[in-house]
Image (spheres, helix red, strand yellow):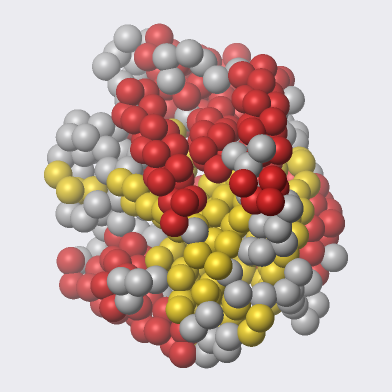
């Protein structure tokens, strides 16, 4: 964005989008008939583009394309848009920009749009405020190429506008789940005698002690929610909670094992749009079962694919029930360990490695957002007894387990990695244990209560 996206811009366009929605064909016809339109577009960055926010090797070549895939639900009030993006993260103003463009294209308001990243690391990681702060340093470091970012928004607008006239009737829905074997493990299982996290079991791991430790707390189930026009499966959304990286950092852009599994399933069923969402995976990764080799990527792809197939086998089609969209705004306070002046010093310090300049710039982006009072929007799409829950950033897996408990017997599929501004979102009791995730969590431990109250409101 050459023009910075301000809150005024956001509100201005929201109002414009609201006005457009009143004139949309669905509302004009006053028809209760539900429809669903699917869309997809390419979000692969150009050669040389920063990956993971600029602290790993930039884009050198493309192993397989990054995509944004989503759907629009029409006929349940103003349109509802849900989109999964093969990027590391979309933070703060950049997230508002994505939701605003998708809303305008669909004729709705940005609060009726959920944009969730899949969180691959050989992929763009976008904070426009951090990009501005880093560019000011004139060191050649980059977070994101703003022109490319804007191109992706143009593609988003075009894809949604093209999709809506081809919408299918939405008559049935189904839920399913399948167990994923030997992919996920908790990252925080190596505790010292003081109860603190001693070392992290990350995405790729060759440390025999860490590999031998148990999986720890994960959610082993891959969940699917599928949408039908009569007997035709139009879209299938798959949800699983793990960091999605088998290997990264050498500039080879890839949708990685979860994206490769999705693409394989897409080839099986070209008539259905398959979408993969990463659940609450802040403290979950594949390290127990992944040595980072090319063979390991193949194995992990197969295991996620098997999970998808198992989940889809359990789908039972039923008429779609009442459809509603609920939102809840939160603005959790900043972690008191972060002091703006110190962060600015880190950004300016030429002796710091890229990560230790860009990460503080992103934390300053979070602080700026709090000053602007731009809320994070939690949302849930309710379809009869099924709920699709959309959470921000890198929530710990405890949150999606809690969401299921809050919903009782109803079926909840949780996508995290929405607005990435908060970075990691640990549960309250994990803060005293320290470790990497807690050290880079932009919110204080009050976020737990705030987020949980929001989930209760959406699901209770
Ligand atoms: Zn992560």
Looking at the image, which residue is at 40% across and 84% down?
309
Q: Is residue 255 left or right of residue 315?
A: left
Q: Is residue 22 left or right of residue 310?
A: right
Image location (x, y in percent) of residue 390: 63, 55
Looking at the image, which residue is at 39% across and 39% down?
158
Reply above or below: 314 against 355.
below
- Quarter holding residue 407: bottom right
Image location (x, y in percent) of residue 269: 32, 76
Image location (x, y in percent) of residue 242: 47, 65
Reply above or below: 14 against 173.
above
Image location (x, y in percent) of residue 44: 27, 43
Mark yes or no: residue 216 visible.
no
Name the foreground residue: 234 vs 327. Answer: 234
Q: Which quadrant: the C terminus?
A: bottom right
Reply above or below: 386 against 307.
above
Looking at the image, which residue is at 29% across and 33% down?
50
Reply above or below: 28 against 242.
above
């Amino acid at each position: 964005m050459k023009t910075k996206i301000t809150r005024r811009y956001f509100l201005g366009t929201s109002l414009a989008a609201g006005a457009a929605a009143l004139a949309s064909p669905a509302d004009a016809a006053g028809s209760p008939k539900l429809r669903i339109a699917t869309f997809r577009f390419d979000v692969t960055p150009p050669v040389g583009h920063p990956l993971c926010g600029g602290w790993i090797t930039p884009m050198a070549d493309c192993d397989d394309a990054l995509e944004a895939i989503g759907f629009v639900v029409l006929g349940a009030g103003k349109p509802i848009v849900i989109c999964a993006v093969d990027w590391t993260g979309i933070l703060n103003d950049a997230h508002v920009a994505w939701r605003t463009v998708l809303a305008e294209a669909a004729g709705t308001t940005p609060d009726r749009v959920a944009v969730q990243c899949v969180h691959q690391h050989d992929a763009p990681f976008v904070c426009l405020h951090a990009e501005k702060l880093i560019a000011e340093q004139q060191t050649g470091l980059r977070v994101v190429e703003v022109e490319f970012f804007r191109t992706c928004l143009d593609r988003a607008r075009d894809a949604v506008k093209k999709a809506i006239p081809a919408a299918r009737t939405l008559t049935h829905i189904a839920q399913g789940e399948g167990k994923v074997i030997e992919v996920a493990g908790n990252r925080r299982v190596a505790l010292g005698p003081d109860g603190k996290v001693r070392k992290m079991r990350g995405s790729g791991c060759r440390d025999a002690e860490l590999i031998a430790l148990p999986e720890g707390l994960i959610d082993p189930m891959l969940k699917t929610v599928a949408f039908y026009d009569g007997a035709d499966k139009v879209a299938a959304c798959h949800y699983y909670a793990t960091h999605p990286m088998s290997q990264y950092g050498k500039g080879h852009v890839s949708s990685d094992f979860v994206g490769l599994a999705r693409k394989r399933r897409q080839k099986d069923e070209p008539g259905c749009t398959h979408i993969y969402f990463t659940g609450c995976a802040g403290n979950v990764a594949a390290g127990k079962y992944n040595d980072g080799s090319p063979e390991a990527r193949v194995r992990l792809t197969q295991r996620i694919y098997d999970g998808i197939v198992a989940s889809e086998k359990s789908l039972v089609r039923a008429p779609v029930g009442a459809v509603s969209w609920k939102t809840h705004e939160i603005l959790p306070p900043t972690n008191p360990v972060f002091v703006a002046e110190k962060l600015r010093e880190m950004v300016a310090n030429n002796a710091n490695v890229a990560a230790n300049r860009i990460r503080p710039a992103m934390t300053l982006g979070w602080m700026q957002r709090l000053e602007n009072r731009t809320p994070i929007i939690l949302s849930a799409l309710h379809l009869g007894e099924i709920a699709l829950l959309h959470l921000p950033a890198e929530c710990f897996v405890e949150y999606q387990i809690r969401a299921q408990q809050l919903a009782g017997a109803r079926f909840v599929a949780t996508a995290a990695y929405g607005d990435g501004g908060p970075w990691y979102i640990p549960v309250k009791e994990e803060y005293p244990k320290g470790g990497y995730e807690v050290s880079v969590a932009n919110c204080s431990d009050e976020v737990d209560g705030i987020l949980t109250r929001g989930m209760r409101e959406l699901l209770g």
